[in-house]
């Protein structure tokens, strides 16, 4: 290769490198990796059957995992009237029964006055800790939800006696 050709190649390579986008060094201390960041609910997220299924799935998963904490995470304790009484009711329910099996079917979802509404058929089998007969309950529950920073949360439901 001649000196002139070599100079031309170096100029072309230099120009290509100068035109390439430069990436800034990544600061790994600024934010946790994307998989550990909590996803906030978008401000315009509409209430639909997918949102309803996610909330009711949290209730089912909390019951079947025997985790009152997971179950109660579906509820908004700050906006729900009688939340502390409900929390005590759930704790007593988990103390009485050692396992749960839940079947649910969403009958209807709607949005009324900026609240999501779910009408769902619930069936639950609860196995007592003392080895007595399995308790079976079936009811149609109506849930009212409001969207907050962490997504849709239950602020009211009827009949509340279902979990007592």
Image (tube, helix red, strand yellow):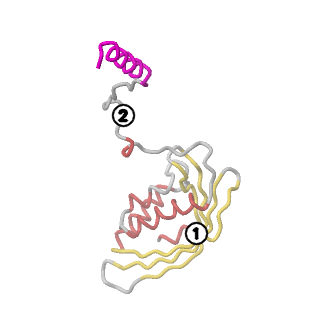
SS class, disc 2 = loop
Query: Residue 23: horizontal and vertical position, in percent?
Result: 39, 26
Q: Does the magenta stretch include residue 85?
A: no
Magenta range: 1-21
Mark found first going from the N terminus, 1 or 2: 2
Residues at discs 1 and 2 in contact (Cβ within 8 Å): no
The quarter of the picture where residue 87 lies is bottom left
Q: Residue at x 31, y 17 (%)?
A: 6
Query: Residue 154: horizontal and vertical position, in percent?
Result: 55, 56
Q: Which residue is drawn at 39% across and 64% down?
A: 91
Q: Return the residue nearer the eye: 73 or 89.
A: 73
SS class, disc 1 = loop
- Label placed on residue 159: 1
Query: Residue 61: horizontal and vertical position, in percent?
Result: 42, 65
Q: Looking at the image, how many numbered discs can be counted on the residues? A: 2
State whether the magenta stretch is mostly helix, strand or loop. helix
- Read off the residue under disc 2: 31
Q: Which residue is drawn at 59% across and 66% down?
A: 158
């Amino acid at each position: 290769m001649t000196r002139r050709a070599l100079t031309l190649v170096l100029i072309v390579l230099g120009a290509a490198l100068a035109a390439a986008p430069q990436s800034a060094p990544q600061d790994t201390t600024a934010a946790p990796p994307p998989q550990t960041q909590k996803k906030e609910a978008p401000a315009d997220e509409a209430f639909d059957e997918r949102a309803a299924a996610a909330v009711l799935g949290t209730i089912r998963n909390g019951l079947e995992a025997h985790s009152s904490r997971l179950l109660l995470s579906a509820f908004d304790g700050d906006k729900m009237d009688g939340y502390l009484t409900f929390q005590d009711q759930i704790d007593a329910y988990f103390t009485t029964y050692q396992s749960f099996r839940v079947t649910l079917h969403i009958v209807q979802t709607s949005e009324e006055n900026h609240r999501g509404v779910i009408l769902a058929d619930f069936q639950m089998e609860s196995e007592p800790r003392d080895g007595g007969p399995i308790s079976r309950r079936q009811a149609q529950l109506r849930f009212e939800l409001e969207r907050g920073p962490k997504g849709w949360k239950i602020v009211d439901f009827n009949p509340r006696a279902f979990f007592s």
